[in-house]
Amino acid sequence: MRTYTIYVLNGLDADIRVRVKANKNATTSGALSVGEFEVKLGDAEGRTISPILTGWLPYVYLELWALSSPASGEVNAWLVKSKDKQVPLVSGLEIRDISSHDPDTDPGKIYIVEW
């Protein structure tokens, strides 16, 4: 099994917490957490996920939240499968609260994708 990298670019003016979730179906219902990390304001972080260690499930998405209420900026993230294949996980998400955000709360901004 291959490993993949989750690359998160935090353009917000607040730190964020990112939870990587995986599921057997393309839905958030019943999803399992397979990793979690923090991304400082204005920074980028990458985390490599290995299905050998986390268990393989065909779908993945991100759940994220700000640690304090941001006033500006956006979050973008990708599932990096290879140098030529980078699949968007989050596109232009403007968070302005400390609530949790996922594909159910922000459809069209946070995506469920296949490994």
Image (cartoon, rainbow, N blue to C red):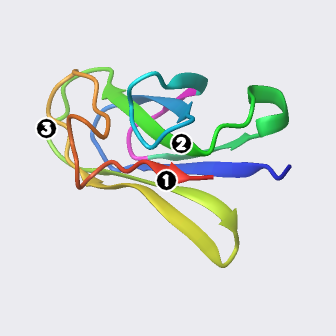
Q: For mark 2, give the secondary structure.
A: strand
Residue visible at 53% across and 42% down? 60
Horizontal placement of 6 versus 81: left or right?
left
Badge 2 density bin: few <14, some 14–19, many ≥20, Cα 10 Å: many
**Residue 18: percent from left, percent from top:** 47, 31
Structural distance between the alpha carbons of marks 2 and 1: 6 Å
Image mark for residue 78: none
> Three-letter amino acid code at disc 2?
Val
Camera-nearest residue between 79 and 57 = 57
- Which residue is under mark 2? 60
**Distance of mark 3 from mark 2, alpha carbons?**
28 Å
- Residue at horizontal 74%, vertical 28%? 54
Q: Which region shows up in magenta?
A: 36-42
Give yes or no for residue 25 being in the magenta stretch.
Answer: no
**Pointers 3 and 2 in contact (CB under 8 A)?**
no
Report x, y in % for residue 34.
Answer: 63, 26
Q: Residues within 10 Å of mark 3 (few under 14, many from 20)?
A: few
> In front: 108, or 40?
108
Residue 22 at x, y = what percent?
Answer: 56, 34
State which mark lies toward you, 3 or 1.
1
Mark 1 neighbour density, 10 Å: few (under 14) some (14–19) many (20 or more): some
Question: Which residue is the site of mark 3?
Answer: 71
Amino acid on which disc 3 is placed: Ala
Work out how far the residue at label 3 is from the one at label 1, CA to CA, in angstroms. Answer: 29 Å
Mark earlier in primary sequence (2, 1): 2
Instruction: Looking at the image, tell me whether mark 3 or mark 1 is earlier in sequence order.
Output: 3
* Residue at numbered disc 1: 113
Q: Are marks 2 and 1 in contact (CB under 8 Å)?
A: yes
Q: Nearer the viewer, residue 69 or 19?
A: 19
Q: Are marks 3 and 1 in contact (CB under 8 Å)?
A: no
Secondary element at tag 1: strand
